[in-house]
Amino acid sequence: MKALVYRRYGPPDVLNVEDVEKPVPKGDEVLVQVHAASINAADRVLLRGKPFIIRLGMGLSKPKHSILGFDVAGHVEAVGPHVQAFRKGDEVFGASRFGGFAEFACVSEQTLVSKPANVSFEQAAATPTAAYTALQAIGKKGGLRPGERVLVEGASGGVGTFAVQLAKAFGAEVTAVCSTRNAEIARSIGADHVIDCNREDFTRSHRLYDLILGVNAYRPISDYARALESNGTYVMSGGGGTQILQAMFHRFWLPKTGDKTLSNIMARAKKADLLVLKGLLEAGKIKPVIERTCSLSDVPDAIRRLENDHARGKTVITI
Ligand SMILES: NC(=O)c1ccc[n+]([C@@H]2O[C@H](COP(=O)([O-])OP(=O)(O)OC[C@H]3O[C@@H](n4cnc5c(N)ncnc54)[C@H](OP(=O)(O)O)[C@@H]3O)[C@@H](O)[C@H]2O)c1
């Protein structure tokens, strides 16, 4: 099969389309013929092997997994001996552990669900990682309740576009923070208010929020705390090491922030969350924002663009 392979960490140039052996599903794995996959921020991190600390788990001198790609949608080609829920020919989408940028990928039955008929393979592939991260950040971690005021900073990228739509679907009043060029996208996905981060600093206004999601947190954590209602919650999904350390530090330093909760999230693919997302896709309550689609061989260019420009929704690979 064809796959986009990298054998050393580096810039997008180290990615090449090669002929490799088709994987064989073991245990609870499902072999998916991939029709579409999508690029996540984590693929860019794993490609470069930076920050260096990730190499402790992913391979010190070279990557342990030579094919990137978590999110896939396609047809079931074959199933492992313990698979109960799927059979050959089913249309599915979900999150693989690696290997999605290929014609075939093995995905655990636990992180795969059937694709709703009303969404394309491209839309389905755009959903898993970004959407379950947003769902876990505002749901389990953020404890969002209907009627609450939510602010999503970084609202126009993969996680942000889902966070805005999910918060609206859960009955919140949503403020989206993004750059000038992305304000229209934020409005089009249902944000009640849009703050242009190039013109206004939401942490300096007097508006307070019950929940703030820092998709790409880059300010001191005290700035986010200032914009929270008492009892409010701040969750960061991405950002620099300093913010992650601050969030961890604050977890053990609650008196400093009174009754506010400041935390970061380590999202994980879970079947229950994928089923919630499937239901919301089916009901038309969330609609993936796809910035562009490309072929496997165009992925290096697409990643270069994502590194130089801020993302607008998702970039999807059609295979
Ligand atoms: N913790 C977890 O488990 C988890 C899971 C998934 C993703 N993440 C992390 O969450 C973050 C967002 O992921 P994503 O998929 O939404 O990324 P993305 O699609 O690249 O979107 C990032 C958005 O953040 C905004 N932004 C603000 N400052 C930025 C900066 N300095 N560089 C780039 N973008 C900036 C951009 O919008 P504007 O141009 O409009 O400002 C952009 O649209 C990433 O850091 C990713 O690693 C974490």
Image (cartoon, rainbow, N blue to C red):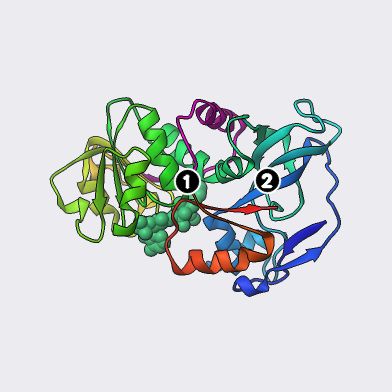
Residue at 86%, 57% (x, y): give it: 21
Rendered position, 18 above or below 236: below
Considering depth in this image, is 190 or 134 the residue closer to the camera? 190
Q: Earlier in the sequence, mark 1 or mark 2?
A: 2
Q: Is mark 1 within 8 Å of ligand 1?
A: no
Extent of the magenta region: 262-289
Q: Position of residue 278 (x, y in %)?
A: 57, 30
Q: CA distance from mark 1 to mark 2?
A: 21 Å
Q: Is residue 233 magenta?
A: no
Whether residue 252 can be seen here? no
- The correct choice, above or below, for 180 with respect to 148 in the image is below
> Residue 15's x, y, as percent?
68, 69
Instruction: Identify the image quadrant of residue 182.
Output: bottom left
Who is closer to the viewer here, 163 or 309? 309
Residue 289 disc label: 1
SS state under label 1: loop
User: Disc 2 marks which residue?
Assistant: 96
Cβ–Cβ under 8 Å for marks 1 and 2: no
Residue 300: give x, y in percent of width and height. 61, 68
**113 above or below 103?**
above
Q: Residue at (21%, 46%) from the top-left corner?
A: 227
Q: Taking 165 as reference, is 224 above or below it? A: below
- Ligand 1: image quarter: bottom left
Label 2 C-beta lies within 8 Å of the nearest ligand 1 atom: no
Element type where label 2 sits in the image: loop
Taking the image as shown, residue 316 lies to the left or right of residue 217, namely right
Can residue 195 be seen in this snapshot?
Answer: yes
Q: Horizontal placement of 2 versus 245: left or right? A: right
* Badge 2 density bin: few <14, some 14–19, many ≥20, Cα 10 Å: many
Disc 1 residue type (three-letter)? Val
Image quarter for residue 148? top left
Residue 34 located left or right of residue 287: right
